[in-house]
Image (cartoon, grey):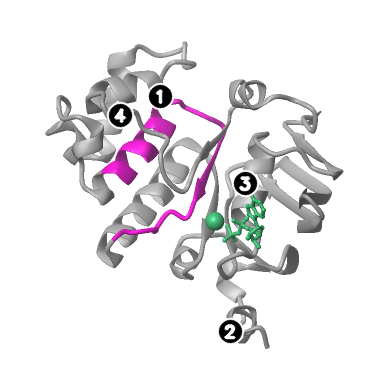
Amino acid sequence: MPPLLMEAENLTVTYGSYAALKKVNFSVFEGEIVAIVGPNGAGKTTFLETVAGLLKPKEGSLKFRDRNITKLEPFQRRKMGLMLIPQEGNLFPSMPVKENLQLGAFFENKRSTEEILNRVYRIFPKLQDRTRQLAGTLSGGEQRMLAIGMGIAANVKALMIDELSLGLAPKVVGNLLSILRDLRDETGITLILSEQSIKALDVADRVYGLEAGEIRFTEDAQQLDRDLIKSLYLGA
Ligand SMILES: Nc1ncnc2c1ncn2[C@@H]1O[C@H](COP(=O)(O)OP(=O)(O)O)[C@@H](O)[C@H]1O
Ligand SMILES: [Mg+2]
């Protein structure tokens, strides 16, 4: 069993008096691909933003790489190798593709920027054809590729992607997912993907079902009972 990389214990997050997450327990092992599935409003974004440090929990704790990070600021978590690609944004729309990727590589000091960019271009050749194009003028799918490319350029330990498939054609989603799996196989990166659709199950090792701020189940993705998924989305 690989070592534990990230762990949330009894995590409760509130907006005013509304509890968007209720005593959530969650763990990810090094090199794992974990999917968080659940209907709109389940608390997926709230969870990822809390792990990234953008929201502070009311109760509970977060551990990353054997360190208690509950009180750390987002940039401190980022420096430890934990990065969130939000549902939208994360790009500098008025800057060219290449500059966006260079910013992504900002914290990476082991390899040269050129080496890093070449790696991203190998994964997303489309971005290489458009290095001078302003990020804001890319199509939705290309912007998502660029946002993920920035995460790859950053050479992080764990990449969290909120709603990977949002606004993308099914074929593009399939491609992105297999690219991410190859990336994990090649580099050992840990991936936490949130998804409203169940497409992410195709590449995940393990799945968490989240509904109304509570974890309903944790399952090995290959053994997942389809009825569990149905009940999650139909509220049965
Ligand atoms: N800034 C906010 N203020 C108040 N309620 C919020 C806020 N953001 C999210 N919520 C509520 O918290 C719940 C979980 O939202 P969210 O984490 O965005 O779910 P998901 O990403 O699974 O769709 C929803 O009921 C949502 O309306
Ligand atoms: Mg969301």
Report how far apart the C-alphas of labels 3 and 4 lie in the structure: 26 Å
Classify residue 151 as left or right of residue 208.
left
Q: Is mark 2 within 8 Å of ligand 1?
A: no
Of the numbered discs 1 and 3, the one sitting upstream in the chain is 3
Instruction: Say whether residue 152 is magenta.
Output: yes
Of the numbered discs 4 and 1, the one sitting upstream in the chain is 1
- At a point 27% along the width and 50% down the height, the residue shown is 140
Please determine whether, in this image, residue 35 is positioned above or below residue 7.
below
Which residue is the site of mark 3? Answer: 48
Please determine whether, in this image, residue 133 is positioned above or below residue 167.
above
In what element is the residue under mark 2?
helix
Asked whether residue 116 is in view, the answer is no
Residue type highlighted by circle 1:
Gly
Report how far apart the C-alphas of labels 3 and 2 lie in the structure: 23 Å
At label 1, counting other C-alpha atoms closer than 10 Å, the crowd grade (few under 14, some 14-19, many 20 or more) is: many
**Which region of the structure is painted magenta?**
143-168
Q: Which mark is residue 230?
A: 2
Report how far apart the C-alphas of labels 1 and 3 lie in the structure: 19 Å
Residue type highlighted by circle 4:
Arg
Instruction: Say whether residue 71 is magenta.
Output: no
Report how far apart the C-alphas of labels 2 and 4 lie in the structure: 39 Å
Which residue is the site of mark 4? Answer: 119
In what element is the residue under mark 4?
helix
Quarter for ligand 2?
A: bottom right
Residue 205, given in percent of the width and then of the height, sits at: 57, 59
Classify residue 129 as left or right of residue 90.
left
- At a point 61% along the width and 76% down the height, the residue shown is 224
Residue 172, given in percent of the width and then of the height, sits at: 27, 58
Asked whether residue 75 is in view, the answer is yes
